[in-house]
Amino acid sequence: MSIKSHINEAVGPLPTKAPALSSNVMDLFSLKGKVASVTGSSNGIGYAVAEAYAQAGADVAIWYNSTPSDDKAEYLAKTYGVRAKAYKCNVGSSDDVEAVIAQIEQDFGTIDIFVANAGIAWSEGRSLEAQGFEGFRKIIELDLNSVYYCAKTVGKIFEKKRKGSLIITASMSGHIVNVPNLQAPYNAAKAGCLHLSKSLAVEWAPFARVNTVSPGYIQTDISEFAEDTVKQQWWLLIPLGREGITQELVGAYLYLASDASTYTTGTDIIVDGGYCAP
């Protein structure tokens, strides 16, 4: 039995026709008429992605946990003429995730694009010296398990409408082992995100696409734990010699969200200044 036959038997018939797409490349990258939901979007990469989607015409659901973001949703709506709303959620709780996604679907009518971006950094150093196991549990819960909670819930919406794009924020740390900062639990969680995405891409092939973006060192709050002496060592290992900024990252997310990527699934886009290249 062929791989295609196995997939058909497991999850249903695969699409056999290419979608009807515009011949204008700018139209392909437009998100007008689509609804995007971005976890961990009160600041940093998540907010940059949410704003980029609003600029491209999408209605946007912002997710936050400890930083209220109603003002940011209001800004996006007024500035870009889209609908935007902020939702408080603990992504480490499957119940919270299910409730918030259901509310977003009710408020916006659907979800077309979902970015599972929320996560935390590991700052406890060498794993053997970390106190107890709570830090490891927290990393796995918020950086890996939460992605599955989101995927399983929004996947049902995508399956119902036979269309959707799930984008997971992985990391270059899922590909390589960072030095000099030691962060085995974080690296393991992000490697898990990469393989979860590829696995879901096969499972969901009949109705939705699943991809990842793997950022390198980006200038956001999540990297504030590192002292300048450590960052200087990062720069020596990055061929471009510096950290990136969020504006250099959002294009990858826009591509994977848009109709420009309708033949792209199960892939990962590394945006790391060349760190993983050597």
Image: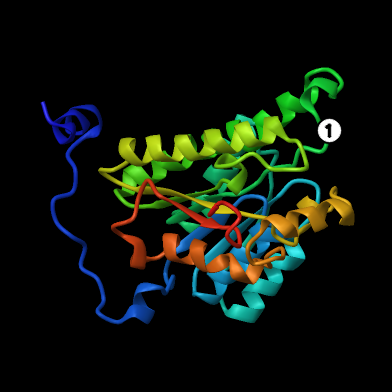
Q: Nearer the viewer, residue 130 or 135?
A: 130
Q: How many marks?
A: 1
Q: Nearer the viewer, residue 200 or 36?
A: 200
Which residue does the numbered mark 1 point to in the structure image? 124
Quadrant (top left, top right, bottom left, bottom right) of the N terminus: top left
Residue 216 at x, y percent in the picture: 63, 54
Q: Is residue 129 above or below residue 201?
A: above
Q: Which residue is outermost to the top?
A: 132
Query: In the image, what residue type sits under mark 1?
Result: Glu
Direction from residue 80 to residue 241 in the image, left or right: right
Residue 113 at x, y percent in the picture: 46, 56
Q: Is residue 111 above or below residue 82?
A: above
| Label 1 environment density (alpha carbons within 10 Å; few <14, some 14–19, many ≥20) | some
Provide the secondary structure element on which disc 1 rests.
loop
Residue drawn 80% across and 47% down? 66
Residue 266 at x, y percent in the picture: 37, 46
Residue drawn 60% across and 43% down? 100
Residue 132 at x, y percent in the picture: 83, 17
Q: Is residue 84 visible?
A: no
| Colour mapping | rainbow
Residue drawn 53% across and 33% down? 192
Direction from residue 112 to residue 15 in the image, left or right: left
Q: Is residue 209 above or below residue 240?
A: above
Q: Which residue is outermost to the left?
A: 1
Q: Is residue 102 above or below residue 47?
A: above
Based on the displayed image, in which of its 4 quarters is residue 3 positioned? top left
Q: Is residue 166 visible?
A: yes
Based on the displayed image, in which of its 4 quarters is residue 274 positioned? bottom right
